[in-house]
Image (cartoon, coloured by chain):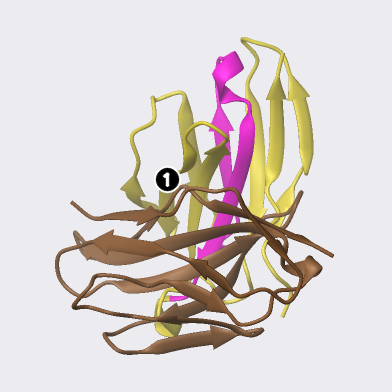
Amino acid sequence: GNSVTQMEGPVTLSEEAFLTINCTYTATGYPSLFWYVQYPGEGLQLLLKATKADDKGSNKGFEATYRKETTSFHLEKGSVQVSDSAVYFCALRFSQGGSEKLVFGKGTKLTVNP
Amino acid sequence: KAGVTQTPRYLIKTRGQQVTLSCSPISGHRSVSWYQQTPGQGLQFLFEYFSETQRNKGNFPGRFSGRQFSNSRSEMNVSTLELGDSALYLCASSDPAGGETQYFGPGTRLLVL
């Protein structure tokens, strides 16, 4: 079936450190891939997306490249800030029965210390 | 454009009661999806409505139901509440013409005592 596996957290980094959160997926067909972020006490916000192989999504200094050969969509940021502390969710969207479905990973909690 | 709004933001109920949560999608979005988020199970899909019809359904008992109105606003109802229904309920809207990317509301936090 269609599923997403992302690295377990929590992840703790110092400010200005390099961030990688791994995400791999299993899917039939050609899914779209997403990263969502959830700040404490809030809903999910779309961070970035990629709709086809080799696409790179980017936003707010975060990047992720859709790698079909390794079925991965790892999230990276060159220099994290305290304000990046949040839970990050990798998600996959696929078509089934004429409609679109979204499947999420379990989330990775990131804490950035000053 | 205003984002997805959900009301109420917080709710406390007791076992056996029922609850109705409301979601107003982004203007122009006709698809509304509901998710339950708990620490143990993560984000789980409840159901999706499109043009007032349920288009998809997750693996939840019949106590969980929903509907969508002609203005695309949606409600979900949980009857005979159980302690395990305590969760953050998230609503997301999307526009098929816009690639169906889902935009989430802030959620309703339900506590069942």
Q: Tell me if I can see residue B95 in this picture.
A: yes
Horizontal side of A52 relative to B47 (left or right) equals left
Horizontal side of A31 relative to B112 (left or right) equals left
Residue sitting nearer the eye, A49 or B106: A49
Q: Which chain does the residue under circle 1 lie in?
A: B
Question: At which x and y percent is residue A4?
Answer: 33, 56
Question: At which x and y percent is residue B89?
Answer: 60, 42
Which chain did the image draw in yellow? B
Q: Tell me if I can see residue A100 in this picture.
A: no
Question: At which x and y percent is residue B104?
Answer: 60, 61
* Residue stretch rendered in magenta on the structure: B70-95
Q: Which residue is mark 1?
A: B45
Question: Looking at the image, is A65 positioned above or below residue B5?
Answer: below
Residue sitting nearer the eye, A25 or A52: A25
Q: Residue at x 65, y 15 (%)?
A: B17
Question: At which x and y percent is residue A16?
Answer: 73, 77
Which chain did the image draw in brown? A
SS for tag 1?
Answer: strand
Amino acid of disc 1: Phe
